[in-house]
Amino acid sequence: MSGAGSFPETLTEQAKALAAGQFSSVELTQHYLDRIKRLDPQVNSFINVCPELAMAQALVADTARARGEAGPLSGLPYANKDIFCTAGIKTTCASRMLANWRAPYDATVVRNLAQAGMVMLGKTNMDEFAMGSSNENSWFGPVRNPWDLERVPGGSSGGSAAAVAARLAPVATGTDTGGSIRQPAALCGITGLKPTYGRVSRWGMIAFASSLDQGGPMGLSAEDLAMLMNVMAGSDPRDSTSVERPPEDFTSQLALPLSGLRIGLPREFNDGNLSAPIAASVAEAAATLEQLGAKLVDVSLPHAGMAIPAYYVVASAEASSNLSRYDGVRFGHRCEAPKDLADLYSRSRAEGFGAEVQRRILVGTYVLSAGYYEAWYRKAQQVRRLIQTDYVRAFENVDVMLGPTTPSTAFRLGENADDPLTMYLSDIYTTGVNLAGLPGLSMPGRAVGNLPVGLQLIGNYFGEQRLLQIAHQYQKQTGWHLARPAFAEL
Amino acid sequence: MSLSTAELLRVARLARLRIDEEDAGAHAAQLTGILEHFAAMAAVDTTGVAPLAHALEVTAVTRPDAVTEEIDRSQLQADAPLVEDGYYLVPRVIE
């Protein structure tokens, strides 16, 4: 129960309660809007809240339910990362460049969630253009971690993670290019799933690095994520990289036992970067899964240490190309009184983009430029192949892998702000998964003091159901996912 | 591995990002630090390894050549910085 009263907190329980008529979607939605209004000034997890739209969607859901036309997600609220385009509601990507931009259409994910009857509470804060691991790179100010308001929530989906942890929304959307769902989920003590590349449509999801970007759900439990995956996943004729697959019910295997499952423990994740208490938390989780019937297997990912360099070269290169569209001409920020076209472009972009985005555009432009392409971009793509091959080989002997999501717990605001390299290292265990295009899930394990710890499960291609099954069984057994920050009691 | 101020300014020009000359040195130093770390990749033997551009080897996807989207120009241009009669306005390019 939230501090404010009588509503259950997980999506699964809320769905049951709505179906049983214990309360209406209008009441549930109002509860969250009230909490956001009262508490979000301390967290800054939302860039824009949309009470009118939310109440209208809630009313439609209640009316549908009264007519017997409610689906499993009808009337359930969610928070939407401000990278997904929403017609009529500003979509900023946390950038000055798009601070007042209104998309002319809804992203496919947004449309799917709306068609399922879900209620959008608002658009969540993030690192600008999804570039960052602390949510300090936002034009709209940093997000604070509900577990400790002096610490970062992680990024780039930091607003989504903080909103769920603070019980300002039951679930949220996120995107993950190098860890941007899993890392903030870990730091905020929630559960987040980065699906296989191509599972969830990228149409209307503002591009950062197109060969790596993937949208996914964030929430309090694996069960809740499974419900959301049922409407988020699916091929989309508007996204030619979305994969044609028969529809799946992502909740259908949650209850299966873990007996006989082979869980790989990549030995390279136990490196010098991993803090001892997090290593202990991972070991404890491995032992729990073993008790539940899984078999632990030592595996090796020999090129794991190259994931960060390969990732940042590839992602920055793609970003420098994707972000060339922001030129101050067709939409977005435009500088005052440009003296010529070159000045219009270069000053609009310098004013519209923050420091980290500019840094990555510069790195990306450099590694793609004549004379450097072979040594940098091509080399990174070759290393990417080696990283993928490592995973493919390891999956010949195991069903999933278990490791840490992050090397440390949430750091203090400002602690790494002037040190991009240290910041990049917080994604050391997540970026390889994106390079290989695999699904990854982060769920809370044993906390370190008051700070949450993320356990990362890595699956084989299209193995989301297996990840959700293992996470659900672990969560039934341990309950770490139900730990709540004191802030949630407010 | 070191990025000079002149190189930094060249890259910034390619990226259409205005960087003031007095700040260019600091940017170059920071990028040098980052690239030095990434240069660890050079030690990896990639002889004969085909570059991987995309995790799932997607092939070109085709569809029937039919009009599926209706675009409302005025709505599309509603948030443009400067438009006139459906055209985007930019500073004069040809005198």
Image: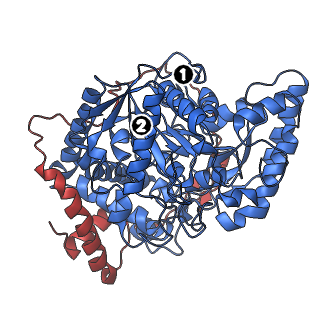
Residue flagged by tag 1: what amino acid is it?
Answer: Ala
Provide the chain ID for the residue under circle 1: B
Q: Determine which residue is flagged by label 1.
A: B66
Is residue B94 visible from the viewing direction of this image? no
Q: Which image quarter: residue B66?
A: top right
Give the residue furthest to the bottom: B22
| Residue A81 in view here | yes
Q: Which chain is red?
A: B
The residues bearing labels 1 and 2 have C-alpha atoms spaced at a distance of 53 Å
Q: From what the image shows, is residue B44 above or below residue A364?
A: above
Say left or right for A419 vs A330.
left
Number of the label disc, if any, that sits on residue A23: none
- The subunit carrying tag 2 is A
Residue at 78 percent of width and 56 percent of height:
A35
Residue depicted at x 48% and y 54%: A130
Quadrant in which the C terminus of chain A appears? bottom right
Q: Are marks 1 and 2 in contact (CB under 8 Å)?
A: no
Q: Position of residue B9 (x, y in %)?
A: 27, 71
Q: Is residue A101 left or right of residue A60?
A: left
At a point 26% along the width and 44% down the height, the residue shown is A268
Nearer to us in this view, B81 or A285: A285
Label 2 crowd (10 A; few <14 / some 14-19 / many >=20) = many
Q: Is residue A244 above or below residue A108?
A: above
Output the letter for the chain in blue.
A
Q: How is the image coloured?
A: by chain
Q: Residue furthest front?
A: A291
Task: Measuring from the top left, give residue A435's x and y in whole percent.
Answer: 33, 40
Circle 1 Cα neighbour tier, 10 Å, few/some/many (<14 / 14–19 / ≥20): few
**In the rendered structure, which amino acid carries the disc numbered 2?**
Ala
Q: Residue at x 26, y 79 (%)?
A: B25
